[in-house]
Image (tube, rainbow, N blue to C red):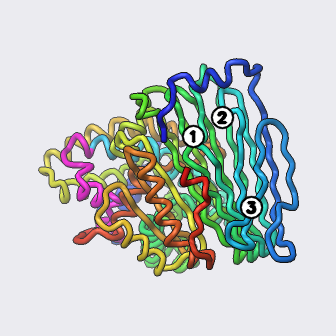
Amino acid sequence: MINDLALLRLLQLISPGLPIGMYSYSQGLERAIDDGLVTNADEVHEWLEGLLVHGMTQLDLPVMARLFDAWTLADNAAVVRWSKTLNACRETSELRAEDRQTGQALARLLVALELDEAQVWLRKPEATLATLFSLAAVRWAIPKREAAIGYLWSWLENQVLCAVKLVPLGQVAGQRLLIALASSLPEQVNRALLLADDDIGGSVFGLALASSRHETQYSRLFRS
Amino acid sequence: MLVESMDAGFVNRQNTPVPGWEATLELGFELGNDKTVLAHRRHHGPLTVQRPFYPEGGVCHLYLLHPPGGVVAGDSLTITITAAANSAALVTTPAAGKFYRSTGELARQSVTLSVAAGAALEWLPQETIIYEGARVASELRVNLETDARFIGWEVLVLGRPAANEGFTVGEACMSWQIFRADELFYRERLKLDAQAFAARWGLNGHSACGTMFACPASIVQLEAVQQLIGETAGRGVTLIDDLLICRALDIRADRLRGFFQQVWAALRPDVLQRKACEPRIWAT
């Protein structure tokens, strides 16, 4: 069980109010909508479920879990290695930039919150969001499973907020999407935490293509 | 063209012994006096090459042959190509690769390309057709030393649209890794099955998908490819440091290949310092 203070720290870490600028990244969704690939709530559901099952659970989450273990063991080499692996698995320059920028932004915030180990990550090119997220989770005594659920939730909420703004959808439709997609998160976390090292890695062709195309999108609100 | 008789694969391979064929091919290119030579060649099983030829001076053009014409469950193909310092080679295939439907076992293909300092390697096989019901695990590993030059692509066709075949069963697991100076620089793992074929986040019902890599590239080449793409749907390009990656999705494989050939022709002068010189076999 997670203790009260750790739960509160987790809520802070995954809040859309966390000042790392997550709201400015759509991860290709802006272009998918612009291309007419995603036009309504059902299609948003399909898109996000694909990313969740084939991307997040195959890549981001299992790597985050390994980073969590590495921070726990103070294994710096493993922290760097898994951060580089995650970076290498980003298929476009915008997806790499997003991870680096949000990771470095979280490093800045953690330094300001007196987590000094974040200091060396301020300018490291291999900084990822998962690198710094897992550092905060470990130092704030958030258990791994709860950290994983929180990480996935904050991704999901951010994506749904993008969809609400861009498709656009009503606020209630957005909340319905969250209710529906969140139901499968526990099972996805189970899967992610059981994945062997050799099986890590999951690309989603539609995402890679949409993200490439986003780089030249004429009028855009988001940075990815 | 993708038109062919429905059971061509089974006719060709009906006498295949079980278990499948293990074929390996090793090729080593080296710079000779005035041209790149195929200095090393070893093969085992049904994988071989034609005699190299030189349509553009010192660059060695080589066609890779797989005489059975297709891969069935249990087969494994292993291709290892090394381009030594300052050599220049272009490897392609005279026909589409084919993976036939499987009753359960995987068919495997593993390609390792190593490019030394100052060398240039082009890996430009024709498309790979994954028949409905095929089960494929395919790996491509590219090792680039500092100052290595590389252009490569992989074009996949799921099912045979010309034979009204969809892709409701079967799967292809594709893995691409690029190492630079022994460090992992890029990794992509794609699982293409019925769901990924149909889904918006996958191929959205398009039977042909392609990924092309070129290195080293800069913003100049990125912009050139972006111009080529213009407003065309199903095309995208990105630049990660000096690795350019172009992706495409199409309902027609020939159109996708045509697009990749255009991109290749646009990139080659800058990436390899050579004018485009299309292998003749592409025109047939």
Residue type at tag 2: Gly
Q: Are marks 1 and 2 on the same chain?
A: yes
Asked which secondary structure carries label 3, the reply is loop
Which residue type does callout 3 highlight? Phe
Name the residue at 64% across, 58% down. B123
Q: Which residue is the site of mark 1? A: B173
Mark with earlier residue (1, 2): 2
Residue A32 included in the magenta stretch of the image: yes
SS of the residue under disc 2: loop
Measuring 63% from the left and 43% from the top, which residue is drawn there?
A: B138
Q: In this view, does A2 lie to the left or right of B172?
A: left
Camera sees residue A75: no
- Residue shown at 38%/42% (left/top)? B206
The chain to which mark 1 is attached is B
What residue would you read off at disc 3? B53
In the image, residue B118 sits, relative to residue B62, either above or below, namely below
Q: Nearer the viewer, mark 1 or mark 2?
A: 2
Q: In the image, which residues are magenta?
A: A20-44
The picture quadrant where one finds residue B84 is bottom right
Residue pointed to by mark 2: B69
Determine whether label 3 and label 2 are within 8 Å by CB. no
Q: In the picture provided, is A36 more to the left or to the right than A19?
A: left
A11 on left or right of B141: left
